[in-house]
Image (spheres, helix red, strand yellow):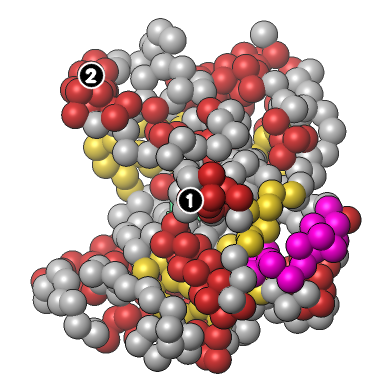
Amino acid sequence: MPSAQPTTRSDELMRTARTVIPGGVNSPVRAFRSVGGTPRFMASGTGPWLTDVDGNRYVDLICSWGPMILGHAHPDVEQAVREAAAKGFSFGTPSENEVLLAAEIVDRVAPLEQVRLVSSGTEATMSALRLARGATGRSKVVKFAGCYHGHVDALLAAAGSGLATFALPDSAGVPVSSAHETIVLPYNDVSAVEAAFAEHGDEIACVITEAAAGNMGVVPPEPGFTAALRRITREHGALLISDEVMTGFRCSAAGWYGLEGEPEGGAPDLFTFGKVMGGGFPAAAFGGSAELMSRLAPDGPVYQAGTLSGNPVATAAGLATLRGCTAAVYDRLTQVSDALIAGATEALNVAGVPHVIGRAGSMFNVFFREERVRDYDDARDQDTAAFGRFFHSMLQQGVHLPPSAFESWFVSASHDDEAVDAVLAALPTAAAAAAA
Ligand code: PLP
C-alpha cells in the first residue's frame, strides 16, 4: 500500500531483514501481513510516543502488546534498569530482585502463595500445564478456541492472535499426538465444557482459559463462566489455570481476578503472568498454592528450569513497573480507554460503519461487525478489510494500532491529553476510510 509518510529506511531494513530473519520479523504479527504495507521499524519510544527510523512519530496503541503500562522509557523503570545493569547482567544464582518481584506478585493476587519466575508467557503456560499434568497424573487439556497461550505445542490448536490473523487452524510441526491431548471448545460455552467432561472427565488434567480473552479481539468471560469452569473442574478432579499473561496487573492491580472478583466456588488453581510484570523485559511467572507449587523441582518431581529465569535486570524492570502501578495509573488507563472508545464509537457511527466494542477493563478493540462477540466464531465474522483501511488511515495520521483486527488495543498511563487528542482527531478520517 503506498504511503504518504517517508518509509525509505523501514523499507530498506525490511528488505535486509527478510534475508536474515524468516519473514523479516521475530514474531509473525509484526509483518503487517493481514493489513498489507510496510511494517515500521521503531527507533525510539518515550511515554505514549514512538518514533520510527524515518522520523515518523506515532501515538502508540500497541504498547509492546501490553507490557508498557507506564509508557515507554518511564524514568523510574529506566533508573531501576540502569542500577541493576551496573551491578551485573545475570548470575545464574539466586538474587534479591527475584524474591522482591515474587513477593510483590503474591501480595497482589490473593490466592497465590508462591510463584516461579520464567522469561516468557509461553514458558509460564507451558510450565503450568506440565505442573497440572504432573499433579493430576492425567494428560488431556481443555482450551478455548480463540484463546492464545503462547506457542506451546499442546495449546496451538485454534489459537487466536497471529494465528487468527493468518487463519491457520493449527501449526505445522505440532505432533498429532500432542494435538490429540487437547480438547478445543467454544469460549463462553458452559454446556460444551460440561459435555467434554462428561465424556473425558477422568482424563482431563486441566482447563486453561484466558482470564478475559484478548487474542481474538477482546472478549470477556460472560457472568458465571469462570465460576462454571471452577465448579466443573472441581467436580472432576481437574485443575483450572487462569492465563493472566495479558490481563495481569493491567485490568487492575490484581489483574482480571481483581476486577471480576473471586469466582463463586473458589479461585483458579494456577495463574500465569507475563507482559506488565516484566516492564518490557523478559520476565513472566506462574503460581498457585504452596502445596501445588511444591510439586516443582527441586522440591518435587515436576521439572522446570531456566538459565535466565529471575534475571536481575528484568526483575528490576518488573518490580519498578509494578510499584509504579498506583491507583492513579489505573484511573488514567480507564479514562484514556473511555475517551478512545467514545471517540471511535462516535466516528464510526457518523461514518455508518457497523461495529461493536469488545472490552475488559482498559483492554478494548473495535470489531467491524454489528452484533456482540462472545466467541471465536463471532470474532472471525467481521469485516477485516474495513479494519485494514481503518488501520492504514490511522497509521498515516500518526496513530499506530495493532496491525490485526484480532488484537486488543493497549493504552498506557502516559497517554496524556495531547496523545488522546491526536487519536481522537484521526478517528473521523479513519472511520470514513473504513466505510469506503
Ligand atoms: N498467554 C496470553 C494470554 C498471551 O496474550 C500471550 C502473548 O500474547 C502469551 C500467553 C504468550 O506470551 P509470550 O509472547 O510472552 O510468550
Task: Tell me what residue is drawn at x 15 percent, y 69 percent.
Answer: 89
Residue occupying the point 38% across, 39% down: 27
Residue 426's place in the image compared with 406, above or below, is: above
Q: Is residue 54 left or right of residue 389?
A: left
| Residue 416, horizontal then vertical, whole percent | 49, 49
* Circle 1: element type: helix
Residue at the spot of label 2: 15
Disc 2: CA contacts within 10 A as few (<14), some (14-19) or many (>=20): few
Measuring from the top left, give residue 5's x and y in whole percent: 35, 16
Q: Which mark is residue 153?
A: 1
First-in-chain label (2 vs 1):
2
Magenta-drawn segment: 192-208
- The reply to whether residue 328 is in sight is no
Query: In the displayed image of the protein, which residue is found farthest to the front?
Result: 177
Residue 310 on the magenta span: no
Which is closer to the viewer, label 2 or label 1? 1
Inspect the image, locate mark 2, and give the three-letter code of the amino acid beneath it: Arg
Residue 91 vertical position relative to residue 184 in the rendered view, above or below: below
In whole angstroms, how far apart are the C-alphas of marks 2 and 1? 31 Å
Pick the quarter of the image with the C terminus: top right
